[in-house]
Amino acid sequence: MDTAKNFLYVGITGGVGAGKSLAGKLLQEKGYKIIDSDQISRRITEPNSPILEKITATFGKQSIKDDGTLNRAFLRSLIMNDAEARKKLEQITHPEIQKQSLHEAKAYASKHTFSLIFYEAPLLFEANAQADKDYIICVIADEKIRIERIINRDKCSSEEAKKIISNQWPQEKKAELSDFIISNNKTIQEFENQLQAILDRLLIFKNIYISTSSSSD
């Protein structure tokens, strides 16, 4: 933990379909700062951006639509079936996402008293973005439930949903590397109860950290 900073940086991750975004939504409703890696990804790939130019140079003109925007459908299909292509795309986007996310966290913290800031990222471990996080929350769910959620969300087949899941780290591996785990197999109320219990502990850690930092001044 960096004792020079005035915020605790907490990662939120989990396998696709587990419910990671629900955790971010509920925390945002409670007034906490949420940094969304997907939003940053969209921002850094806007028309004429340096990252979009790198993607075009790597994957060709098919990666850009006629209106100059990123052809997400093409890239999604490409990386679903080509591990090497997925690796190349991640090498282009992940470092910039990490840079932008940390910059956003520091900018927010500079305008507030000691903060709890949450970073929501489905590929937190895959992107090796855990190093600067003080704590990590992992949301998990039974695979059957995850498949059903992906089918409902993406209007895809069961086979396609399973393929999407297989392109990420196993959620068990993510859970082992995390500090807190939320099981999202039942009701939203149960989910909220687990999240609040974690938040209560983080607030205790925050107060201890503030006290320790003050006494060392």
Image (cartoon, rainbow, N blue to C red):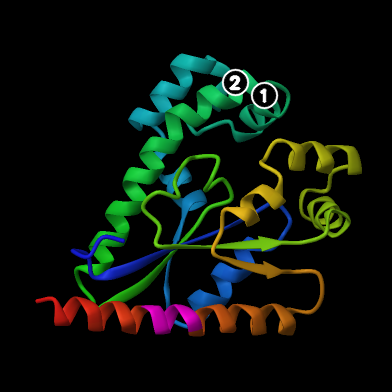
Q: Residue at x 73, y 55 (%)?
A: 17
Which residue is identified by label 1?
A: 78
The x and y percentages for residue 136 are: 51, 61
Position of the N terminus, as image quadrant, is bottom left
Q: Amino acid at mark 1?
A: Leu
The kind of secondary structure element at disc 1 is: helix
On the rendered structure, is 66 left or right of 156? Answer: left
**Circle number at residue 202:** none
Instruction: Tell me where the magenta segment starts and ends, as one range.
Output: 201-205
Residue lying farthest left?
217
- Residue 14 vs residue 157, the one in the foreground: 14
Callout 1 touching callout 2 (CB < 8 Å) = yes
Q: Residue at x 19, y 68 (%)?
A: 110
Mark in front: 1 vs 2: 2
The kind of residue tagged 2 is Ala
Q: Is residue 177 above or below residue 211?
A: above
Q: Earlier in the sequence, mark 1 or mark 2?
A: 1
In which quadrant is the C terminus drawn? bottom left
Q: Is residue 45 at least partly visible in the picture?
A: no
**Residue 85, numbered circle:** 2
- Which residue appears at 59% of the width and 50% of the height? 122
